[in-house]
Image (tube, rainbow, N blue to C red):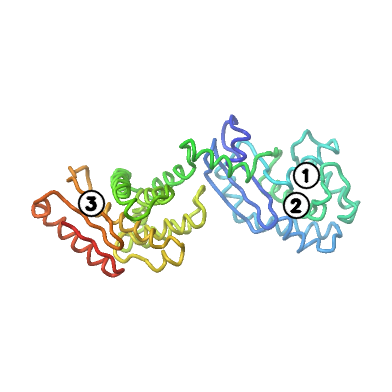
């Protein structure tokens, strides 16, 4: 979506983006640089070629089967897409580009895909009868074999969504990845927008999240050298986890850390890799009660570092157990292997017995993973 959005940066209103791949077809509705609805269907030009045009023969009956199969797939999402609506539809795949170019070469359009052009192109394919005989301008030899299936899927999309025109974008997945990386460099990170949307959707207390994030990053900076946490990516990961550690509260208070972990692992989070989501989910899962140390080690070679991030997250949450902008005491952290030393001003713990009890209880939880929390 970012690749398309940067190709059409000034276009007003919502846009529908469709991408017909080899095994699946993606749909996104978004505005400006933010996606609002994302859907993926298990239909693609390669998989449908294997199902309906395996021997390369093109007949009306086979084409109708492919078209009907695509319409059946679309039935589950077409109402949701229409309900949100769009002002412009854009295709972002080689299949849609080939169809648009073939339609234009045949004098049926000006570079866009339209219903009349699809009907004309379908008639040409029926006359040819075999993929080996497809020699139309705009259709490269390496795309001939999957072209009839791709056209059937595209026609089904047009009919299901009642489209009258679809333009083609040169920017797509590869460009989107590059724009994502550039945005991270210039502090216009799609991941920040993703987390903001997640926090809004699950009614996260943003002030509390900001307090915990600031404290977690402050703690990270104090012990990064001691613990070998010299990777900025780990600091980012800790900040993200602090920001969204309470998303599960919107589901239920009981075991909300487990609910939050499930939401994070299984939600569609643009900008995050699959491993990033899994690590975030585990940090949220471990921010209270038992720490899933074994799962950290299974997931990543940096399992020890992830465990240490989890300890820092728990420290920051514990520090702000009393929610609100209370005056916080000065403290010093020092790390040594599987031990975190916390030093408060002299007499402060004695004057704050509930906080002292809180840290004593936390020390018992950390003992379960052979970790020592030394608070003085």
Tell me the residue that label 3 is attached to: 319
Q: Position of residue 117 (x, y in %)?
A: 80, 41
Tell me the residue that label 2 is attached to: 150
Q: Position of residue 327 (x, y in %)?
A: 17, 42
Q: Earlier in the sequence, mark 3 or mark 1?
A: 1
Q: Residues within 10 Å of mark 2 (few under 14, many from 20)?
A: many
Q: Earlier in the sequence, mark 3 or mark 2?
A: 2
Residue 69 - label: none
- Compared across the picture, whether 56 is left or right of 223 comes to right
Tell me the residue that label 1 is attached to: 99
Quadrant of the image occupied by residue 312: bottom left
Query: SS of the residue at dot 2?
Result: helix
Q: CA distance from mark 3 to mark 2?
A: 57 Å
Residue contact at pointers 1 and 2, CB within 8 angstroms:
yes
Q: CA distance from mark 1 to mark 2?
A: 9 Å
**Mark whose residue sits in front, 3 or 1:** 3
- Residue at horizontal 29 percent and vertical 46 percent from the top: 218
- Compared across the picture, whether 330 is left or right of 9 comes to left
Quadrant of the image occupied by residue 295: bottom left
Q: Position of residue 236 (x, y in %)?
A: 41, 48
């Amino acid at each position: 979506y970012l690749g398309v959005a940067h190709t059409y940066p000034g276009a007003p209103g919502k846009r529908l983006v469709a991408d017909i791949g080899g095994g699946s077809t993606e749909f996104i509705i978004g505005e400006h640089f933010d996606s609002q609805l994302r859907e993926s269907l298990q239909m693609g030009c390669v998989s449908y070629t294997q199902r309906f045009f395996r021997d390369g023969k093109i007949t009306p009956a086979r084409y109708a089967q492919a078209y009907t199969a695509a319409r059946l797939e679309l039935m589950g999402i077409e109402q949701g897409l229409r309900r949100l609506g769009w002002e412009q539809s854009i295709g972002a795949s080689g299949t849609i580009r080939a169809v648009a170019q073939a339609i234009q070469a045949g004098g049926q359009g000006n570079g866009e895909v339209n219903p009349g052009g699809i009907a004309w192109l379908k008639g040409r394919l029926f006359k040819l009868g075999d993929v080996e005989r497809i020699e139309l301008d705009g259709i490269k030899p390496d795309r001939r074999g999957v072209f009839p299936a791709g056209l059937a899927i595209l026609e089904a999309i047009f009919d299901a969504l009642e489209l009258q025109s679809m333009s083609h974008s040169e920017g797509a997945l590869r460009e989107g990845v590059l724009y994502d990386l550039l945005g991270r460099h210039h502090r216009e990170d799609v991941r920040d927008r993703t987390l903001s949307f997640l926090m809004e959707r699950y009614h996260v207390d943003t002030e509390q999240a900001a307090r915990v994030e600031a404290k977690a990053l402050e703690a990270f900076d104090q012990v990064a050298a001691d613990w070998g946490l010299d990777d900025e990516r780990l600091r980012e990961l800790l900040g993200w986890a602090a920001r969204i550690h309470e998303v599960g509260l919107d589901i239920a208070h009981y075991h909300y850390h487990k609910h939050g972990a499930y939401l994070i692992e299984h939600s569609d989070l643009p900008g995050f890799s699959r491993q990033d989501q899994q690590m975030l989910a585990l940090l949220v899962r471990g921010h209270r009660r038992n720490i899933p140390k074994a799962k950290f080690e299974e997931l990543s070679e940096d399992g020890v570092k992830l465990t240490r991030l989890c300890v820092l997250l728990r420290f920051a949450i514990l520090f702000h157990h009393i929610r609100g902008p209370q005056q916080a005491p000065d403290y010093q952290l020092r790390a040594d292997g599987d031990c975190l030393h916390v030093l408060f001003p002299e007499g402060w713990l004695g004057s704050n017995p509930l906080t002292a009890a809180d840290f004593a209880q936390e020390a018992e939880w950390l003992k379960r993973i052979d970790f020592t929390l030394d608070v003085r």
